[in-house]
């Protein structure tokens, strides 16, 4: 039942209202709300001081979920100052509930009919009264709280900050208030340090948004200068070729400047797709459950108009001999220059299947097929007006490329004619001598030096920067439209939004003449198209640049001239071995060059020569490591014992002796080296068995040239008799092993900690939806759709729940997750994971072995992962294009 008491409140007077009851506490005494409202232009400012008891806090966000509403929609941009202690035991001690202060802005001079929506809805009427001096004081207090650390709009972990950052920047400019400082690197610094293999644009876009308000000249200036000189790179010295090297035919049709991920068979290609499907369509789910689903697989299939049917699975191996993913970049979220390359055993059947899929897509509508001429060959080009479909189908004998990029299609045909194919590249041939075709790897990945040079060259690099600027401007325009609509302003054009203060004055064409525009209710970039379906970078020629872009590229070259010095190829081979029906062993052999050359050189100076000796397994260890140093060998192990710690509100809290938190050992052979400082804590001579005790409870056992340390005497006594080294097949300087985490004693503790972090990730999405509702006045039923449109993702609950809109007991509609359903033991308050919950990687990692060899030319690594595969999940049904909500017009929302 909703409890409601209405009173008229003048500035700085109190209103008596009756709250709901705290569960199990009985009736609360009447509590006081202190209200203050001072009119002003363009906004008045107000404050409510509200007593809070646990029974008032909405689920699942608690105090973060308290909403402020006004009958005429005249209250804006509330900021909540939360107390350090809330209700319960504290309230019983002092006979009063703690208070939360809610600041807000409002329009007009008429009385405000305000509702504070917790689990109960509390209504009051506040009549504004003029007070010029108090207005300035209260406005500053509101701004201090609105931008405060941990405030209502302060980004929390896994909380997409784009909307919050925009509102703070926009309001600071409109009110002449201090602009919030950018946390972390500027976008220029961040971009300069990124090579761009798989650039994440979210932090860049957030920083660029800040620059649009704070440094408007960064995007200005005509593109009148020539392209700067490219990276002055020198080819590495390769060993002379030995025996003839077998090269797969597919490589003869791949451009030398393309990345290359070859599967060797159609079966291996299907294994990758099936494994990706099992892990929710994103390999990052192997590390941590994601709250944002970028739907990369769906985007690729939708753009290329190619998917695997049941018939293709049945006949694929007899029709397809080899498969590879190729391309010039990995920007799949924004629109990549990529393609799927097939070598057919039966070209007629393969071409018929591709053609049939394209015909079926044509029947669905919204796409056009053209025949275009590329490199003298007629090519089928299937495309939609919004760029979601962009597919060139290019057959060349038994080799068939389906690609999003016209440039890649042209280079594919040229490579087939012998113009700079990957197969002729000396570095690729050397990589094939190290990882021969006869290994029959499940996947072979080669990132060529030509690919890296193209990616870091001036044309590609500057267009990448322009693309991120375009995305940041689209974010700004979309948020400005929402904010203006939330304030009741019917502004549809950028110039109107600039005049009203929702966009910075400099918002407009950038150096290449492009700008964010609104067409048919959808925000686009005038040159590149719609979000998530930009024209590939390879198809966006850059003829001239601005002075600022030239300077940015020069700084980038200066950074990498000192940090990396040379671009070398990266090669990795992946082999899958089936252990049993539920387990696979994944073996990865990789050869990479580190980015930070200076740090790499220091590491080289510390390491000793590689050998074939390995620290033999010690009974009771869950993990162990060893490093060959230039003065001996460093080694250690972690025992599978539950340490005396607990997880409380995401913090690791010791419940016993600090020295028992890490139960294990560390030791060294040869000279003391980096463990020499440990010896300074020992003043007594060792006993007859080599044991001695030092300060802080540290124990040591000396055995010849070996010293082993532990905080637990019993660990030393048990481990040291087992220490030995055994011969292995491979030379290495660094080795690491990890046992089966599913049955380890420490697993429940690790699972509890990661569950708490995962829960915060899920709540972060709910905070985002709350901000769309509370800060931008988006109708609550539209919040999820518009948030997904802005971020170009699908919001998903990492706790395997579904985000749903529900009305709480007080009658307020709220977004929540079914993972926090009240009948699930009030799961939103729980700190322990529910029965059966096991977080990645604990739910699949059954063993890990790593060996690394560090040499002047780079790092060679051998990794073996024993993984348990999840149960089969139904394959996704490709969504029909008309249901693609990412293209929904921004303005198609109910009026305020």
Image (cartoon, rainbow, N blue to C red):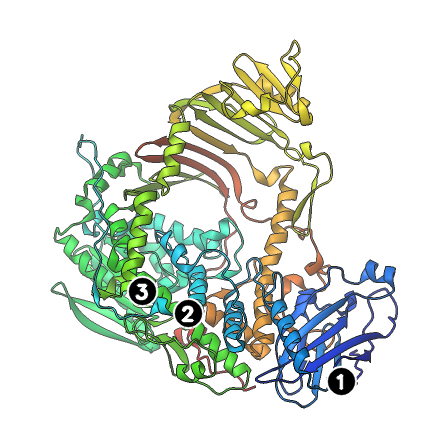
Q: Are marks 1 and 3 in contact (CB under 8 Å)?
A: no
Marks 2 and 1, the one that precedes in the sequence: 1
Which residue is nearer to you in this view: 193 or 749?
193
Circle 1 Cα neighbour tier, 10 Å, few/some/many (<14 / 14–19 / ≥20): some
Q: Residues within 10 Å of mark 2 (few under 14, many from 20)?
A: many
User: Mark 2 — residue?
Assistant: 212
Q: Secondary structure at mark 2?
A: helix
What residue is disc 3 on?
304
Q: Residue furthest bottom?
A: 110
Residue 377 in which image quadrant: bottom left
Which secondary structure, mark 1? loop
Rounded to the nearest whole Å, what is the CA distance between mark 2 and mark 1? 41 Å
* Percent position of residue 601, x then y: 36, 34
Q: Quadrant of residue 465?
A: bottom left
Q: Quadrant of residue 346?
A: bottom left
Residue 333 lies left or right of residue 794; in this view the side is left
Query: Position of 77 compared to 448: left or right?
Result: right
In the displayed structure, would residue 131 be above or below residue 868? below
Q: Residue furthest front?
A: 133
Q: Position of residue 202 (x, y in %)?
A: 44, 61
* Residue 750 at least partly seen: yes
Q: Secondary structure at mark 3?
A: helix
Q: If the image is split into quadrants, where does the N terminus sit?
A: bottom right
The disc label shown at residue 10, or none: 1
């Amino acid at each position: 039942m909703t409890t409601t008491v209405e009173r008229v409140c003048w500035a700085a007077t109190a209103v008596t209202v009756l709250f709901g009851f705290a569960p199990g506490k009985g009736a609360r005494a009447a509590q006081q709300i202190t209200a203050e409202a001072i009119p002003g232009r363009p906004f008045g400012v107000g404050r409510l001081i509200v007593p809070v008891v646990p029974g008032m806090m909405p689920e699942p966000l608690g105090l973060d979920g308290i909403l402020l509403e006004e009958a005429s929609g005249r209250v804006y941009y509330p900021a909540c100052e939360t107390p350090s202690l809330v209700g319960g035991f504290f309230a019983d001690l002092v006979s009063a509930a703690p208070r939360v202060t809610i600041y807000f802005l409002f329009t007009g001079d008429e009385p405000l009919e305000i509702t504070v929506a917790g689990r109960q809805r509390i209504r009051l009427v506040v009549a504004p009264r003029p007070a010029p001096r108090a207005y300035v004081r209260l406005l500053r207090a509101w701004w201090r709280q609105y931008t405060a650390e941990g405030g209502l709009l302060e980004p929390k972990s896994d909380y997409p900050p784009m909307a919050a950052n925009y509102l703070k920047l926009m309001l600071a400019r409109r009110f002449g208030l201090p602009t919030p400082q950018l946390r972390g690197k500027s976008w220029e610094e961040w971009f300069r340090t990124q090579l761009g293999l798989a650039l994440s644009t979210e932090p860049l876009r957030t920083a660029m948004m800040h620059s649009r308000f704070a440094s408007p000249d960064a995007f200005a200036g005509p593109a009148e200068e020539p392209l700067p000189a490219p990276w002055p790179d020198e080819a590495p010295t390769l060993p002379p070729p030995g025996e003839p090297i077998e090269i797969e035919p597919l490589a003869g049709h791949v451009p030398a400047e393309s990345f290359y991920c070859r599967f060797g068979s159609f079966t291996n290609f299907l294994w990758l797709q099936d494994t990706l499907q099992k892990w929710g369509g994103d390999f990052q789910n192997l590390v941590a459950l994601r709250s944002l689903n970028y739907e990369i697989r769906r985007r690729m299939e939708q753009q290329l108009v190619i998917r695997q049917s049941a018939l293709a699975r049945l006949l694929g191996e007899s029709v397809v001999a080899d498969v590879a993913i190729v391309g010039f970049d990995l920007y799949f979220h924004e629109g990549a220059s990529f393609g799927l390359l097939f070598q057919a055993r039966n070209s007629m059947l393969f071409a018929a299947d591709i053609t049939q899929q394209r015909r079926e897509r044509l029947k669905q509508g919204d796409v056009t097929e053209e025949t275009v001429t590329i490199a003298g060959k007629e090519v089928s080009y299937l495309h939609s007006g919004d760029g979601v479909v962009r597919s060139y189908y290019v057959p060349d004998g038994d080799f068939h490329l389906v690609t999003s990029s016209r440039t890649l299609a042209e280079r594919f045909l040229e490579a087939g004619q012998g113009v700079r194919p990957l197969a002729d590249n000396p570095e690729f041939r050397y990589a094939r001598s190290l990882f021969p075709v006869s290994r029959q790897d499940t996947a072979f990945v080669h990132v060529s030096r030509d690919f890296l040079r193209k990616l870091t060259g001036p044309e590609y690099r500057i267009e990448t920067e322009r693309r991120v600027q375009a995305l940041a401007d689209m974010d700004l325009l979309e948020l400005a439209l929402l904010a203006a609509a939330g304030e009741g302003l019917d502004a549809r054009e950028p110039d109107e939004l600039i005049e009203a203060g929702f966009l910075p004055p400099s918002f407009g064409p950038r150096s290449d003449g492009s700008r964010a525009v609104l067409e048919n209710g959808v925000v686009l970039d005038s040159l590149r198209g719609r979000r998530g379906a930009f024209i590939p970078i390879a198809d966006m020629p850059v003829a001239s640049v601005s002075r600022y872009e030239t300077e940015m590229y020069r700084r980038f070259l200066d950074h990498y001239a000192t940090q990396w010095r040379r671009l070398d190829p990266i090669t990795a081979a992946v082999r899958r071995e089936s252990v049993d029906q539920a387990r696979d062993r994944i073996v990865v052999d990789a050869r990479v060059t580190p980015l930070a050359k200076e740090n790499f050189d220091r590491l080289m100076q510390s390491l000793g020569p590689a050998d074939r000796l390995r620290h033999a397994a010690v009974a009771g260890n869950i993990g162990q490591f060893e490093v060959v140093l230039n003065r001996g060998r460093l080694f250690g192990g972690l025992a599978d014992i539950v340490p005396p710690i607990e997880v409380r509100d995401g913090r690791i809290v010791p419940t016993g002796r600090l020295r028992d938190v890490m139960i294990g050992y560390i030791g060294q052979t040869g000279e003391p080296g980096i463990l020499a400082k440990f010896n300074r804590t020992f003043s007594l001579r060792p006993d007859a068995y080599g044991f001695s005790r030092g300060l802080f409870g540290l124990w040591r056992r000396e055995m010849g040239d070996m010293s082993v340390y532990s905080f637990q005497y019993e660990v030393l006594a048990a481990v040291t008799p087992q220490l030995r080294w055994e011969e292995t097949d491979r030379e290495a300087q660094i080795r690491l092993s990890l046992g089966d985490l599913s049955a380890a004693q420490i697993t429940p503790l690790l699972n509890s900690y990661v569950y708490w972090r995962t829960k915060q990730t899920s709540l972060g999405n709910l905070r985002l939806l709350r901000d769309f509702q509370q800060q931008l006045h988006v109708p609550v039923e539209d919040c999820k759709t518009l948030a997904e449109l802005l971020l170009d993702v699908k919001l998903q609950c990492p706790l395997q729940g579904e985000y749903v809109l529900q009305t709480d007991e007080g009658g307020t509609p709220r977004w929540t997750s079914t993972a926090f359903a009240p009948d699930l033991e009030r799961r939103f308050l729980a700190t322990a994971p529910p029965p059966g919950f096991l977080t990645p990687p604990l739910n699949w990692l059954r063993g890990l072995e790593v060996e690394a060899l560090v040499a002047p030319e780079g790092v060679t690594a051998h990794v073996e992962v024993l993984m348990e595969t999840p149960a089969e999940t139904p394959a996704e049904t490709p969504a029909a294009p008309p249901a693609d909500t990412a293209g929904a017009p921004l303005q198609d929302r109910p009026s305020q």
